[in-house]
Image: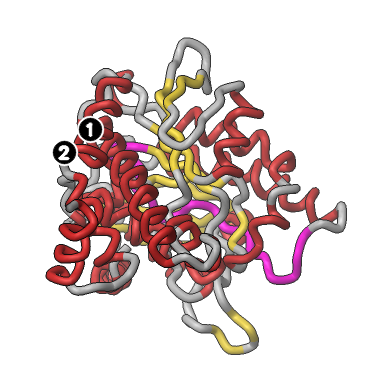
Amino acid sequence: MHKQHGIALVLASLLAGCASVPSGQSGNVIDLGDSQRVTRLFAYPNNCNVICFRDWTLEQTVEHYLGQSLQRDGYPQASVKVKREGERIQAYFSGVPDGYGKPLQQLLDAGELAYDGASRLNKDGKWAYDWYFFLPLGMALENRKSVELLHFPPDYSLTQAQDYLESKTTDRWAALLGYNGIALAQTPAYQTIVDIAPIAAPANAGSTLEGVYGYFNNYQQRMVSELSAGKNGASLPMVAFGSPVRSWVKQQYGVNLPVLGLGQITPAPNTSVAVLGANHPSYIWYAADPANNQGNQAKADATGIKVMGEDLSAACWQADMGQQPAANAQQTLDSCKQKWQVTNKLQTCELFYTTVRNLKPEEAEAKCMKNAS
């Protein structure tokens, strides 16, 4: 999520929190549970170490994330007010269709399964002191276009940004969706994330987290089943990012997914969901590091350009299938690979040099023209 947009979301949610709720309001009033339940499912307080980074109440914290969902669902004029009624916490939505709160309730119910798993993990002595329980809050709830399977959210998305889509990983992928014709304001609808470990952790915690997935099986399966169900019965396309996640898909659903490998999973009876294997969005910086290419800069660049072509192809598939979920998944993938690895090969090269090597556009163009000759 881009910085200006993130600030706007915070302001919008705070302004929404100031709105008065008409007496006797009915319709989209969602009972979120008692304060204890809401406290744990919204990781409240998100960052307090004697001094709170943002000194918000529980109600303000919930409003913040629900306000993000309203924006990402395409309801910028809608508002939400969260109030405490005795021991219950209730969300009052206005300006949204009836039934808007159903997927929110599904998320929180699934979140209980995640919390149970995290509690067992801690009981078994496997929880780390610098991990935070964090559900994918603030996502598009209703108008989703595709689902992204990822490993775990970085800790700063919770503690600093309080925005699940505020990370280097999601920013880079949003940009790739943009190169494939999706307006940046629309990319959050494509980036509905299911992390197989609902734990915000330091970026280098990946290898440690690989041993915890089994604690979250019930949560993972429910989330994949519910989030992959689109409107009008069509299943939403899904992208599995990074080798730990692709391995998890094979273990859970028996589908082998190499990079740009396409498969079908059945997360619920009589449903079939197209899943594409992809590199982790941040993998390109590792792959293109000369230190990982025998110290050879030219080899590192060539590796990076190859990965850039794979990433652009995957984002192309996600963008196209998100707009037309009933399209032929394999034909769409073939078309995307042709586009970015053959037809627009020069642009792929230039995007690598501008976005990964940080060259100026004219420098990137000259370098790619030289390589092509």
Q: Secondary structure at mark 2?
A: helix
**Residue placed furthest toward the top:** 270
Q: Is residue 83 above or below residue 107?
A: below
**Residue placed furthest toward the front:** 373
1 to the left or right of 272: left
Camera-side residue: 37 or 23? 37
Which residues fall within the magenta stretch?
A: 127-146
State how many labels appear. Answer: 2
Q: Is residue 91 above or below residue 204?
A: above
Q: Name which quarter of the figure residue 49 lies in.
A: bottom right
Q: Secondary structure at mark 1?
A: helix
Task: Identify the amino acid type marked 1.
Answer: Gln
The alpha-carbon separation of the residues under discs 1 and 2 comes to 6 Å
Residue 136 inside the magenta-drawn segment: yes
**Residue placed furthest toward the bottom:** 51
283 to the left or right of 329: right
Q: Residue drawn at (27%, 34%), measured in percent from left and top?
A: 337
Image position, residue 241 (x, y; %): 48, 44
Image position, residue 109 (x, y; %): 57, 40
Task: Identify the amino acid type marked 2.
Answer: Thr
Image position, residue 223 (x, y; %): 52, 36
94 to the left or right of 277: left
Image position, residue 203 (x, y; %): 57, 66
Residue to which mark 1 is pinned: 338
Discs 1, 2 touching: Cβ within 8 Å: yes
Give the main secondary structure of the magenta stretch: loop
Can see residue 26? no
Q: Residue drawn at (50%, 61%), measured in percent from left and top?
A: 286
Residue to which mark 2 is pinned: 343
Q: Is residue 148 above or below residue 128?
A: above
Q: Residue drawn at (76%, 52%), measured in percent from left and top?
A: 119
117 to the left or right of 16: right
